[in-house]
Image: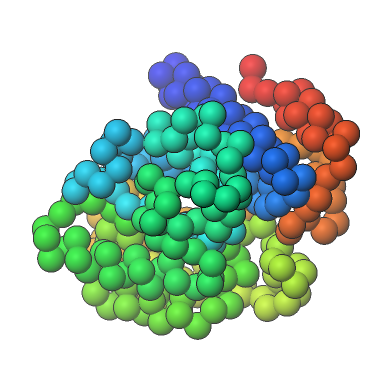
């Protein structure tokens, strides 16, 4: 790996660390939340926003921007953390997360937050919306990409697969779907509740260019995002990212149930300390 790439990955690691720190800051406001998901997906979002996507944070509605659809609306806490790191939001606003009249509701909503492109909540809608946006951008002859972040539990939803058929049929090579495969959903372990494996073979059969990577390995993610953007075939792309819930905070990683967690007041200090102990060099 070249010196330039090493430096770039080092900077991404530091910024992903700040994304995790800011997610903890927001969760601490209410003493609970979807912080384990935010910690797990921080690397994926950092590479998306700080390496791959074409954006102008000072012009959130710039016509030639790449779009990002947060299909897993309850990941709003992770989205706000990366939007802050990317420059859409001031860090001082994070403490308003989930409060009355805040621009940062607990579930992502496009009408409130600069940089948010869809309102989430009901899962399974991100890929269908990406198909609509992708078709529209194609008709405008735009070179912009549409990214959509889905959870692995969401893959049990029918609209996701209907959209997958459509994306392939219309050769929407401007769609880059992302799956946060953390093996957890609200009802329990996602492989037990509704197994969707073998995912690579399924999406390949649906006509996608598929990659599966360690979602907490920054160099692997950078390569996967670059491959997705540069792939020459006229087909939609998907990156399945295997992530670890609570990544970066050891005692949260070890929790058996961490879809929605509550911490005691003294545990927030422990979370900051654990994260700092693993701060990138």
Residue 88 position in % (x across, y down): 40, 36
Q: Residue at x 84, y 51 (%)?
A: 255
Q: Residue 20 vs residue 59: left or right?
A: right
Q: Residue at x 34, y 42 (%)?
A: 53
Q: Residue 234 vs residue 280: left or right?
A: left
| Quadrant of res 162 | bottom left
Q: Residue at x 50, y 39 (%)?
A: 82
Give 121 or 180, whichever is nearer the viewer.
121
Give 223 or 9, whichever is nearer the viewer.
9
Up the image or down, 202 lies above or below 105; here it is below
Quadrant holding the C terminus: top right
Give 99 or 181, whichever is nearer the viewer.
99
Number of numbered labels in the structure image: 0
Residue 86 seen from this side = no
Residue 195 position in % (x across, y down): 67, 76
Give 118 or 7, whichever is nearer the viewer.
118
Up the image or down, 194 lies above or below 129; here it is below
| Quadrant of res 146 | bottom left
Residue 198 position in % (x across, y down): 59, 72
Of all residues shown, which one is farthest toward the front? 100
Residue 84 seen from this side = yes
Up the image or down, 213 lies above or below 188; here it is above
Residue 93 position in % (x across, y down): 52, 34
Up the image or down, 146 lies above or below 206; here it is above
Q: How is the image coloured?
A: rainbow
């Amino acid at each position: 790996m070249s010196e330039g790439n090493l430096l770039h990955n080092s900077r991404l690691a530091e910024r992903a660390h700040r994304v995790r720190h800011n997610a903890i800051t927001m969760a601490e406001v209410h003493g609970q939340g979807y912080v384990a998901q935010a910690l797990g997906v921080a690397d994926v979002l950092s590479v998306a926003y700080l390496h791959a996507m074409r954006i102008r944070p000072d012009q959130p509605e710039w016509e030639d921007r790449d779009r990002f659809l947060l299909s897993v609306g309850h990941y709003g806490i992770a989205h706000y953390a990366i939007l802050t790191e990317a420059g859409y939001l001031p860090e001082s606003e994070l403490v308003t997360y989930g409060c009355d009249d805040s621009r940062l509701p607990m579930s992502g909503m496009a009408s409130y937050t600069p940089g948010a492109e869809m309102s989430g909540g009901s899962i399974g809608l991100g890929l269908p919306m990406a198909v609509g946006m992708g078709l529209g951008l194609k008709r405008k002859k735009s070179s912009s990409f549409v990214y959509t972040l889905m959870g692995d539990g969401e893959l049990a939803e029918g609209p996701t697969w209907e959209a997958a058929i459509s994306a392939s049929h219309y050769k929407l090579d401007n769609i880059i779907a992302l799956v946060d495969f953390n093996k957890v959903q609200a009802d329990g372990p996602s492989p037990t509740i509704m197994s969707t494996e073998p995912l690579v073979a399924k999406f390949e059969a649906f006509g996608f260019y598929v990659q599966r990577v360690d979602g907490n390995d920054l160099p692997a993610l950078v390569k996967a995002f670059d491959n997705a953007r540069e792939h020459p075939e006229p087909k939609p792309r998907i990156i399945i990212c295997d992530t670890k819930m609570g990544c970066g905070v050891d005692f949260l990683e070890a929790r058996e149930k961490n879809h929605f967690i509550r911490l005691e007041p003294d545990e927030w200090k422990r979370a900051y300390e654990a994260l700092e102990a693993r701060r990138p060099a």
